[in-house]
Image: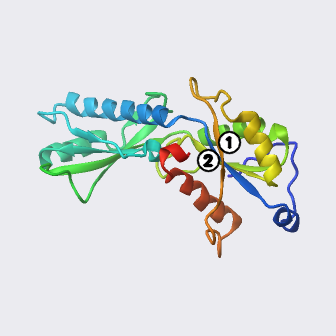
Amino acid sequence: VVTRPPSLSPRGPAQVMASRVTTLAVAYSDANTVRSRLVGVAQCVRELCSAAGHSAQLPQLALPRIARFGFWHMGFRSEDDFAAAIETLHGRELGPTAGCPAGRLVLEREEQPFDGIAATACCSLSSLSADHLSETEALLARRFGASGGLLSVYVPRLPSGWDPGVAALTFADGESAEAARLLLDGAPSHVAGDELTALRHAPRAGAGEGLSEAGAREIEALRLLRCEEHEI
């Protein structure tokens, strides 16, 4: 899915190649905001597990260093507790929580459990809304398209449907990308309390070789998530 501002018309391949397409990496959610959102969901799930009476102790939680991927780990002290949690929580729908859209819980066994723990589940909240990221793309397209030259906006689609808080915006040339960056870097985001952070992003050489345009864009957008948080 690529969102194009209505006022922009597609360019032909030769014209795009000649104009040196430039990508901006735009974070519209601060890393701490994304992490707090994930912590809130994880704590909610842990309490649900405890409330079901299947665990004598609250499961241990561990979040990845980069919370933008939208998953966490939950460790259980016995196989019985793990099995009960899977039966009780896997596939359970949750209403909007911790700033997240409504979603369905996904719990899967992690092959390498925590030290001293019988079993570990890899957990995520799969969004029930297919359009929430498309809406974000449309909003970013309207804001960044105002300075001209915007070709596409793409928010990486994670397996869980989690909102990563970062997008790849492609411009027809470096001048257009720089104009948009100067205009909007540090401006208020649509996420309450956060600011937009826009940085020029150099795609890895050869990343798109042998792939369709959409496939190359997918790889580059997902690479943004693997950057150190301070680089996004």
* Residue that appears at 68% across and 36% down: 185
- The image shows residue 192 at horizontal and vertical percentages of 58, 24
For marks 1 and 2 on the same chain, the one whose residue lies earlier in the sequence: 1
Mark 2: few/some/many CA within 10 Å (<14, 14-19, 20+)? many
* Residue that appears at 32% across and 44% down: 90
Mark 1: few/some/many CA within 10 Å (<14, 14-19, 20+)? many
Looking at this view, name the residue that lies furthest to the bottom.
210
Q: Amino acid at mark 1?
A: Glu
Whole-angstrom CA distance, mark 1 to mark 2, is: 7 Å
Task: Tell me, for residue 16, which label it has, or none.
Answer: none
* Residue that appears at 68% across and 69% down: 212
Q: Secondary structure at mark 1?
A: helix
Residue receiving disc 1: 137
Considering the image in quadrants, where does the C terminus appear? Answer: top right
Taking the image as shown, residue 90 lies to the left or right of residue 114, namely right
Q: Amino acid at mark 2?
A: Val
Taking the image as shown, residue 200 lies to the left or right of residue 109, namely right
Taking the image as shown, residue 9 lies to the left or right of residue 180, namely right
- The image shows residue 30 at horizontal and vertical percentages of 53, 34
- For the residues bearing labels 1 and 2, Cβ distance under 8 angstroms: yes
Residue receiving disc 2: 155
- The image shows residue 81 at horizontal and vertical percentages of 16, 42
Taking the image as shown, residue 3 lies to the left or right of residue 17, namely left
Q: Secondary structure at mark 2?
A: loop
Does residue 102 appear anywhere in the picture? no
- The image shows residue 130 at horizontal and vertical percentages of 58, 43
Residues 126 and 21: in front is 21
| As drawn, 90 above or below 11 | above
* Residue that appears at 64% across and 69% down: 208
